[in-house]
């Protein structure tokens, strides 16, 4: 059995390529790295890699992580600039015994030292969105922050190994040096090949409060299906957070277990992509129900067409 699940519609092409390779027997870590690189390289995606929206100073600072579910080895970068593929740096760091989580200049220096591609990650489009938002925020004294769309993936290969990866430009207009959940083990991602894995997208500040990726894996270890684990972890935490703070940011979690079964839970409308040995790459939309379950529907052709238009026009 093999399988891969990923956050957001933007992951569709990457998941399609990765699923073909997983079918042919590629190692899951390589499949995930390749799939995330495709998203990082696409300038149309505003929340990951090249074309990602910058921080308040106009600098693109990226976060990424990789975890190997066989060894628990983790590599993370946070607030890294000018590096074309943060996921590849994170994967390389996961092989280090020490210094496996690097931030800012240290992360960039490591990338340079290890021969990773260096490039300016700010596109003209991202720069003009930043200029526009800066003016609006200054003029209207608005809260500058929108929701956020990290790419996260969990995969299983034919040998039974599992891995997870994340990549994100973080919150648009974030303060310089702000780091989200995506590079943080337990919050943005977690995987154990004997159990399964989970990964998150949404408001990092709130995701960190619940360590939801780890919580979902822990529940799967206790026998929950991926769907039951996602429902339990996400809706319970959203309730507790709302009771204590009167608000909860948007967040969505996806999970896959070692049998290739998958699940999702979210407190907003959320698109994700799945491919398994039994199922060709498919985009779904999940929505929460009042009774703390998740409605999951395949997207329609019209929905996909809207997304295509949005990606090219916007
Ligand atoms: N989930 C990504 C972030 O908050 O930075």
Image: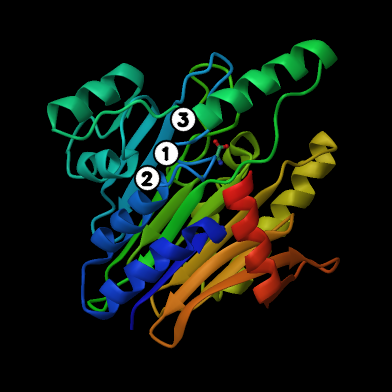
CA–CA distance between discs 3 and 2? Answer: 12 Å
The x and y percentages for residue 142 are 80, 20
* In-front residue for pair 285/91: 285
Tell me which residue sits at (35%, 25%) in the image: 120
Residue 307's place in the image compared with 168, above or below, is below
Residue 49 got which mark?
1
Decide: is 56 above or below 155.
above
Between tags 3 and 2, which lies in front? 3
Q: Quadrant of the C terminus?
A: top right
Q: Nearer the viewer, mark 2 or mark 1?
A: 2
Q: Residue at x 47, y 41 (%)?
A: 48
Residue carrying label 3: 123
Q: Residue furthest front?
A: 313
Where, by quadrant of the figure, is residue 153 drawn?
A: bottom left
Tell me whether the residue at label 2 lies in contact with that at label 1, contact meaning CB atoms closer than 8 angstroms: yes
Looking at the picture, tell me which residue is in the foreground, 163 or 302: 302
Q: Are marks 1 and 3 in contact (CB under 8 Å)?
A: no
Ligand 1: image quarter: top right
Q: Quadrant of the N terminus?
A: bottom left
Q: Quadrant of residue 208?
A: top right
């Amino acid at each position: 059995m093999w399988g891969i699940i990923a956050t957001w519609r933007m992951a569709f092409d990457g998941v399609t390529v990765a699923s073909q390779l997983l079918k042919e027997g590629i190692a899951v870590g390589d499949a995930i790295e390749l799939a995330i690189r495709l998203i990082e390289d696409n300038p149309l995606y505003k929340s990951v890699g090249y074309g990602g929206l910058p921080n308040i100073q106009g600098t693109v600072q990226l976060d990424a992580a990789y975890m190997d579910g066989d060894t628990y080895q983790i590599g993370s970068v946070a607030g890294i600039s000018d590096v074309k593929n943060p996921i590849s740096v994170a994967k390389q760091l996961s092989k280090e015994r020490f210094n496996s989580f690097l931030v800012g200049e240290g992360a960039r220096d490591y990338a340079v030292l290890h021969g990773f591609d260096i490039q300016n990650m700010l596109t003209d489009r991202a720069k003009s969105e930043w200029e526009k938002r800066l003016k609006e925020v200054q003029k209207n004294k608005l809260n500058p922050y929108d929701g956020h769309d990290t790419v996260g993936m969990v995969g299983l290969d034919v040998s039974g190994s599992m891995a997870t990866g994340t990549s994100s430009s973080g919150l648009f207009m974030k303060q310089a040096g702000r780091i989200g959940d995506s590079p943080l083990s337990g919050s943005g991602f977690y995987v154990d090949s004997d159990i399964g894995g989970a990964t998150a997208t949404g408001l990092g500040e709130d995701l960190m409060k619940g360590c939801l990726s780890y919580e979902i894996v822990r529940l799967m270890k206790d026998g929950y299906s991926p769907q039951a684990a996602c429902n339990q972890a996400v809706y319970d935490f959203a309730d507790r957070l709302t009771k204590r703070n009167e608000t909860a940011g948007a967040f969505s979690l996806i999970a896959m277990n070692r049998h290739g079964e998958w699940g999702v839970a979210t407190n907003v409308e959320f698109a994700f992509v799945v491919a398994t040995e039994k199922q060709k790459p498919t985009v779904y939309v999940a929505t929460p129900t009042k009774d703390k379950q998740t409605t999951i529907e395949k997207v329609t052709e019209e929905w996909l067409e809207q997304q295509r238009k949005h990606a090219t026009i916007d």
